[in-house]
Amino acid sequence: MKQGIHPEYRPVVFQDISTDFAFLTRSTVETGETTTWEDGNEYPLVKVEVSSRSHPFFTGKQRVVSAGGQVDRFHKRFGMNRGSTSGDK
């Protein structure tokens, strides 16, 4: 590897601002904030809006939207024949 061209890969704390969930990992992200972690050491801090603790997919609160009815309404509104593949009415 060339010296001096790669960003510093170091431990960083990511904090979910909506749930106050935080985790320590390694990253090259630049940040001006720091925080003291559970081990007593100070690490750079990155605040994020969504993490696995707040994202609907991971929390089980994801809403499933059925597009079937919307497609039928579209075909009915614009008079398209669903059996036709050439676009004829």
Image (spheres, rainbow, N blue to C red):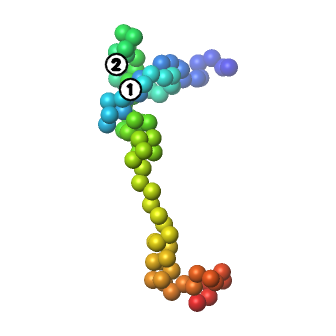
Question: Which amino acid does the dot numbered 2 rest on?
Answer: Thr
Residue 67 position (above or below residue 35): below
- The image quarter in which residue 36 lies: top left
Residue 9 position (above or below residue 66): above
Give the image location of residue 72, x and y in percent.
Answer: 49, 76
- The image quarter in which residue 37 lies: top left
Q: Which mark is residue 34?
A: none
Say if mark 2 contacts mark 1, CB within 8 Å: yes
Cα–Cα gap, marks 2 and 1? 11 Å
Quadrant containing the C terminus in the rendered view: bottom right
Q: Which residue is mark 2?
A: 35
Q: Nearer the viewer, mark 2 or mark 1?
A: 1
* Helix, strand or loop at mark 2: strand
Give the image location of residue 42, x and y in percent.
Answer: 37, 13
Give the image location of residue 77, x and y in percent.
Answer: 45, 83
Q: Which residue is mark 1?
A: 22
- The image quarter in which residue 55 lies: top left
